[in-house]
Amino acid sequence: MEGLMMHRPLRIADILAHAAQIYPEEGIVSARTEGDIHRQSYAQTAARVAQLAHGLIAAGVKPGDRVATLAWNGYRHFELYYAISGIGAVCHTINPRLSAEQMAYIVGHAEDSLLFFDTTFLPIIEGLSGQFPPSLRYVAMADEDKQPESKVELLNYEAMLNGQPEQFDWPEFDETTAAALCYTSGTTGNPKGTLYSHRSTVLHALCTAISLPKVLREGSRILPVVPLFHVNAWGLPYSAPLTGASLVMPGPGLDGPSLFKLMDAEQVYSAWGVPTVWLGLQQEIAAQGRLTEGFGHLVVGGSAAPRAMIEAFEKEGVDVCHAWGMTEMSPIGTVGNLPPSMEDAPLSEKLEIKRKQGRRAFGVDMKIIGEDGSAQPQDGTAEGELFVRGNTIAAGYYNNPEATAEAIDGEGWFGTGDIARISPNGTLSITDRSKDLIKSGGEWISSIDMENVVMGHPNVANCAAIAVPSEKWGERPMLIVVAKGEPPAPEALRDMLEEHFAKWQLPDDILFVEELPLTATGKVSKLTLRRQYAAAG
Ligand code: AMP
């Protein structure tokens, strides 16, 4: 028997409409690239989003079109999220830290029609416009009187909004309609696109709100340091307005002193980001000898949060929530809240739990598969590759059947490439990574791609790129080379790599060895190398 309830499609536009009516005092504070602080309520934001939607349609954007953004965290980027998806088009956020080669690839693969960019990224646009599709048009996200001069023809964001109506009758479409596209690095080759739907996005916002009621609530002030170009800033542009929390957007100022100043002035309660940024903030807190005004909560994820970092914040009175997830999971999979019974426990006991990746969020099913291919018990001891399933998890990659086939197992579960243990109460511990990737400052570097480039040198017999631990970046790449004849100069290898990799992705160290350790099956044992060079970072 069917239930007798209405079925209304879940739509992203309804989140902002809700916030504009129910939480008119809340909104978005932005440190702008122009250098000032900008404030706007959700009601004002909704009016501008309506104007932008009219502007997009006037510019010829149609449902299903991909519209790209290359921008920091700020109100205009937020507005693009809602206007683009609201008219049924797809908001494709581009990570400006990708190499030129990867950026050109994803813009071509996504077939973007318009590209909105913060003016700090004008050099990227000018450098790559020749490699982007000729039909692509560019919009500078700037005040009209700050429109940059360029050899590339540029539209202006504010001009697009000017004179447009402040109301928009949002169209109804199936809730499975695509809303946003975010590319993530593959183990090898080109990045792969995760294509979120309206349904997955709204459900993710609801599920995150349930997991973090202490933070996602009316009047709370949240700082997303995690970029809007990196998995939708962990869903905050949706979960914050949904629950009545305000967002404090840091723009390009992500160093410790800039974050301290903004958080202090805006009384940020909860800050979200990867471990690397919190090291900078911790140093500034130490230099100032105090916490910022109102600061009490931190969400850290994207890489494992070091125990010492959690401990230092906790000792200052900041409640640290260690979260785990993936681009392909919208992204939140687990959240490290303590049960109320633990609130008065000694710090050492709390830290034992908080250094783990947290408890499973509602709607995320997990299984771990051992080396023999069998499902392992969730007893906190058995280890294996983690697979996930749920309404907020990618069923495949955009226009990429090979990568989809690799990622999804025979039973429809998504393979995370993380090695994990799960305890009976659903607490996850990530213990290692099976995917051959290096994560530095929250961003990926493909070790296999690096090895492929280096193997192209005539004097290289074999090589391995491995992650070595780094206090600041979490991991840094190290290249270990077996030479054939005269060893090549490290600069020559770096020059070869620079053609394909962004500067920050290049290895800090290049070592020459006689031979590389092998596994029983004759492959280079990265595990042995990682252990051998663990202290090198
Ligand atoms: P991304 O898609 O860039 O968000 O990267 C997702 C991957 O980052 C996961 O599969 C993990 O390998 C890693 N990761 C994310 N959060 C954590 C965490 N809290 N601890 C350890 N690794 C993490």
Image (cartoon, grey):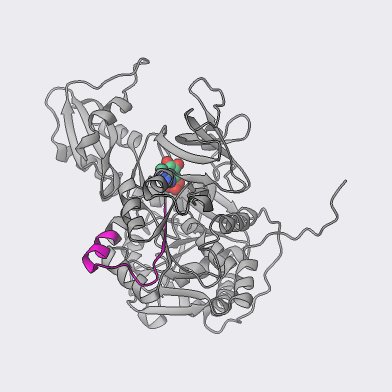
- Look at the image and say whether residue 290 sits in the magenta stretch: yes
Give the quarter of the figure containing the C terminus: top left
240 relative to 395, above or below:
below
Q: Position of residue 215 (x, y in %)?
A: 50, 63
Foreground residue among 215 and 38: 215
- Image quadrant, ligand 1: top left
Q: How far across and down, in percent of the image, does residue 354 sit? A: 42, 47
Residue 152 position, x and y percent, is 37, 67
**How many discs mark residues in the rendered view?**
0
Please tell me which residue is depicted at 52% across the width and 50% down the height of the picture: 341
- Taking the image as shown, residue 485 lies to the left or right of residue 377, namely left
Residue 83 visible in the picture = no
What segment is highlighted magenta in the picture? 282-300
Q: Residue furthest right?
A: 1
**Visible in this render: residue 27?**
yes
Residue 180: image quadrant is: bottom right
Q: Is residue 43 above or below residue 123?
A: below
Q: Residue at x 59, y 44 (%)?
A: 364
User: Residue 515, relative to residue 21: is it above or below?
Assistant: above
Picture quadrant of residue 409? top right
Relative image position of residue 231 (x, y in whole percent): 48, 54
Q: Nearer the viewer, residue 108 or 429?
A: 429
Image side of residue 471 versus residue 198, left or right: left
